Amino acid sequence: MEADKYYTIKENSEGIYKEKGSRFLSFAFPVNTEDEAKQHINDLKKKYYDASHCTYSYKIGIENQIFRMNDDKEPSGTAGKPIYGQIIAHHLTNILIVVVRYFGGTKLGTGGLTKAYREAAKDALHSENIILKTIECYYEIVINYEDLDKTLKIIRENKSKIHSKKIHPSCQIIFSVDKQYAEILIKQLLKNNRLKINYLYDK
């Protein structure tokens, strides 16, 4: 895989695994920040408030990666870790997988739990939903109004996408550019010393 590309999922997806009366409902989400991941987790906890457990794992970032695993009172290492194992096995990032368990009355043991959470997570990862993305670098520019048109022209001519513009009280532009073109574009923009560029994140 090229250095400026990564695998993630295109859209939300779901799966399910059943074992000895227990149901394991799985949900996969594309996410770019921890706040996004936490919001999905909180939403599922509210929706499935009567579930026995709400476990999850996520991995965010391309170079400086963040990852978390949570067993939600299941025996240590039997839920979050096998869920995360599926993220690693599919070479994914910028993804959250949540598995909600409804206990069916029969204990599965640590081996059974590990298998159940692994299979539930796997079932949410539909192959047609896994995509290869080019890394985009997101930036914010703050400039004077008189330099707005010139700056927009430079951005548009360099394979970039403008996501938002604010004109008042100063001009603010949020844009993204493929990582391979980012350095060239930033150098061109910095020739105008009356602007300020802030790196935001990669996506």
Image (cartoon, rainbow, N blue to C red):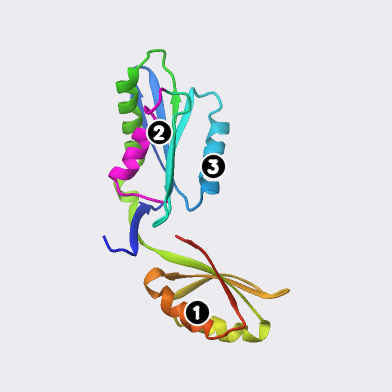
Q: Is residue 101 above or below residue 66?
A: above
Q: Residue furthest left?
A: 1
Q: Where is residue 49 shown, x and y percent of the image?
A: 56, 27
Which residue is under mark 2?
Answer: 80
Q: Can residue 94 be found in the magenta stretch?
A: yes
Quarter containing the C terminus: bottom left
The residue under label 2 is which amino acid type?
Answer: Gly
| Helix, strand or loop at mark 2 | helix
Q: Nearer the viewer, residue 180 or 165?
A: 180
Residue at the spot x=48%, y=26% of the render? Answer: 53
Image spot of residue 134 (x, y percent): 36, 64
Q: In the image, 85: left or right of 101?
A: left
Q: Is residue 32 visible?
A: yes
Q: CA distance from mark 3 to mark 1?
A: 33 Å
The stretch drawn in magenta includes residue 153: no
Q: CA distance from mark 2 to mark 3?
A: 15 Å
Task: Please name the residue that numbered disc 3 is placed on.
Answer: 38
Q: Quadrant of the N terminus?
A: bottom left
